Structures are given as C-alpha cells and as structure tokens.
Image (cartoon, rainbow, N blue to C red):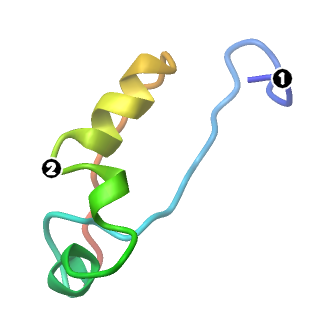
Amino acid sequence: MRVLRPGGTLVVIDNDQVNGDFADLLAVSSAAEPQGYEDYVPDWWSAQGAHTAAVMST
C-alpha cells in the first residue's frame, strides 16, 4: 500500500493452491502446511483490505 497512489491497482500473479495444474504439487510441498488450506490466501488478502479475483489461464 505504501507504493500505490490512492486508488491504485496492484496485480499479483500466483499459483492457485486449490485449482489448476500445480494445485496437487503445491498441496504436498513442504511449504503447504504453513500456508494453510483453501481459504488461507484469499482470507489473508482480505485482511489486508484487498479484493481478489481468480483468473484461470489455459
């Protein structure tokens, strides 16, 4: 939030931990447990005051 002007937009691209090609691999990775489960990432962004929108690529 410190680098955006008021009303600015931040775009974050990340691997989906629930759907998509890498979800199964991410679920068994050593970093999976500390990151929580299905709602962890959207809940974290929401707590930061952000709105998220999933966009699936092909």
Image coordinates of residue 40 in percent, x first then y, are 27, 41
Viewer-proximal residue, 3 or 33? 33
Image quarter hosting the C terminus: bottom left
Question: Disc 1 on helix, strand or loop?
Answer: loop
Q: Which of the 4 image quarters holds residue 39? A: top left
Q: Earlier in the sequence, mark 1 or mark 2?
A: 1
Residue at x 38% of width, y 23% of height: 46
Amino acid type indicated by mark 2? Glu
Note whether 52 is above or below 31 in the view shown: above
Amino acid type indicated by mark 1? Arg
Q: Name the residue carrying label 2.
A: 38
Q: Name the residue carrying label 1.
A: 2
Residue at x 47% of width, y 24% of height: 50
Viewer-proximal residue, 31 or 47? 31
How crowded pointer 1 is (Cα within 10 Å; few <14, some 14-19, many 20+) is rated as few
Residue at x 82% of width, y 20% of height: 5
Image coordinates of residue 17 in percent, x first then y, are 24, 65
Say whether marks 1 and 2 touch (CB < 8 Å). no
Total marks in image: 2
